[in-house]
Image (spheres, rainbow, N blue to C red):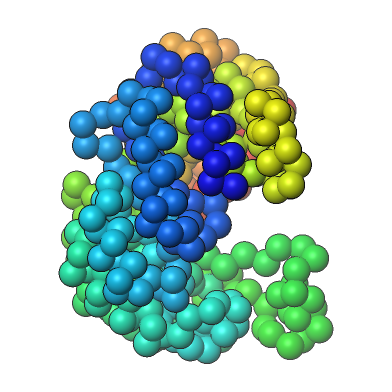
């Protein structure tokens, strides 16, 4: 698999031939299971075949149970300069509910070590978990703050159809997700992170100044990127593509020097929808000036027409030709984005 990933990187160099790479992200699974030498081999292939900026942001996703002190020390000597650690919660009951492999104390120990070797760390925290009290959620946040991590990504638990959680809720084994409790968690999240000096630059992303995720920010700003490996997605402003997710078929295809990719060409409406979907989630908002330049006056008028009901409901605000969600609207941003879609 490592050899195939390296080969795919070489096969796709033309896609970013005129681009300077600013971010590299090891994610989409548990890349921390890779050895130091395997990660170094992949990075070496990137550096040999692409133009890289002087100080790129290079992130590694990891679970606490994968990050031993020896491994963290090794990673600290590599080009990796940012860790994304899937903490989720510091309470064992919550972790067991989410079927996580680590325990709360393991998460704390991991952060205690990681913060000695890395300055740029982001952690994931989940809220809206059934039976999670407001006091427990506040304690989760306070523990995170105590480690002085410079970035927190926080997501609401969602119930996907045909999953074990959906079945348990339907059977009454677990209570249904409470929107009012989730809203209380979200409100506390926004208030407490602000007190600690974090900036909510995207609905789920809270960073200290200078510690916003450059990689994720590029997604939200519509930058071109390529995804390498089985199931990885790519985007070049006018099309979206994805690799086959079947590992054996991926390996066989790459061995024949063929990237097993499916491409979807984005219509003008699709491109507009992509822009408003990401813009409504961030502090940069939806720029009417940008819409005018990229899509024309018809799209500006359409955007303003849709905006009226949300302006009346105070879920968005319009200032200096930029539409942004209010705090009330942030919790409803997926629905707001859907309202703006042209279909």
Whole-percent x, y for residue 78 in the image: 27, 51
Q: At 51% from the left edge and 60% from the top edge, which residue is drawn? A: 30
Q: Please give the name of the residue rendered at 36% of the width and 38% of the height, measured from the top-left corner.
A: 44
Could you say which is closer to the camera, residue 273 or residue 213? 213
x and y, in percent, of residue 245 in the image: 70, 45
- Residue 100 vs 159, above or below: the answer is below
x then y, percent, for residue 42: 43, 42
**49 to 68, vertically: above or below:** above
Q: Is residue 135 left or right of residue 73?
A: right
Q: Identify the residue at image location x=38%, y=25%.
A: 50
- Using the image as rendered, state which of residue 10 and residue 303 is in the foreground: 10
In which quadrant of the rendered view does residue 109 lie?
Answer: bottom left
Residue located at (67% from left, 67% from top): 159
- The image position of residue 257, as x and y in percent, is 65, 26
The reply, left or right, for residue 45 in relation to residue 144 is right
* Number of numbered markers: 0
Please tell me which residue lies in front, 121 or 166: 121
Q: Is residue 63 above or below residue 268?
A: below
Give above or below for 87 relative to 118.
below
Which quadrant holds residue 119? bottom left
Residue 37 visible in the snapshot: yes
Q: Is residue 183 visible?
A: no
Specify the quadrant of the image occupied by residue 138. bottom left
């Amino acid at each position: 698999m490592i050899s195939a990933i390296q080969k795919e990187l070489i096969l796709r160099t033309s896609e970013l031939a005129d681009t300077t790479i600013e971010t590299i992200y090891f994610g989409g699974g548990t890349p921390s299971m890779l050895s130091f030498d395997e990660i170094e081999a992949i990075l070496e292939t990137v550096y040999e075949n692409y133009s890289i900026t002087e100080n790129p942001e290079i992130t590694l996703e990891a679970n606490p149970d994968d990050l031993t002190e020896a491994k963290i020390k090794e990673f600290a000597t590599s080009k990796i300069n940012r860790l994304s650690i899937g903490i989720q919660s510091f309470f064992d009951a919550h972790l067991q509910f989410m079927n996580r492999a680590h325990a709360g104390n393991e998460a704390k120990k991991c952060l205690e070590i990681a913060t000695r070797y890395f300055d740029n760390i982001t952690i994931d925290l989940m809220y809206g978990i059934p039976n999670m009290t407001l006091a427990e959620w506040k304690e989760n946040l306070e523990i995170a703050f105590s480690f002085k991590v410079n970035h927190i990504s926080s997501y609401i638990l969602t119930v996907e159809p045909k999953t074990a959680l959906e079945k348990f809720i339907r059977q009454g084994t677990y209570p249904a997700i409470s929107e009012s409790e989730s809203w209380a968690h979200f409100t506390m999240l926004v208030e407490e992170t602000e007190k600690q000096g974090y900036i909510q630059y995207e609905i789920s992303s809270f960073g200290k100044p200078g510690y916003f995720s450059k990689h994720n920010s590029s997604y939200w700003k519509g930058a071109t990127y390529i995804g390498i490996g089985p199931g990885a997605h790519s985007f070049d402003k006018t099309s979206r593509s994805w690799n086959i997710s079947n590992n054996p078929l991926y390996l066989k295809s790459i061995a024949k020097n063929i990237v097993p990719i499916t491409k979807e060409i984005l219509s003008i409406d699709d491109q507009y929808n992509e822009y408003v979907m990401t813009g409504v989630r961030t502090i940069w908002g939806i720029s009417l000036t940008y819409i005018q330049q990229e899509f024309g006056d018809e799209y500006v008028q359409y955007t303003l027409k849709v905006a009226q009901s949300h302006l009346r409901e105070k879920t968005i605000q319009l200032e200096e030709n930029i539409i942004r969600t209010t705090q009330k609207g942030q919790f409803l941003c997926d629905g707001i984005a859907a309202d703006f879609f042209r279909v």
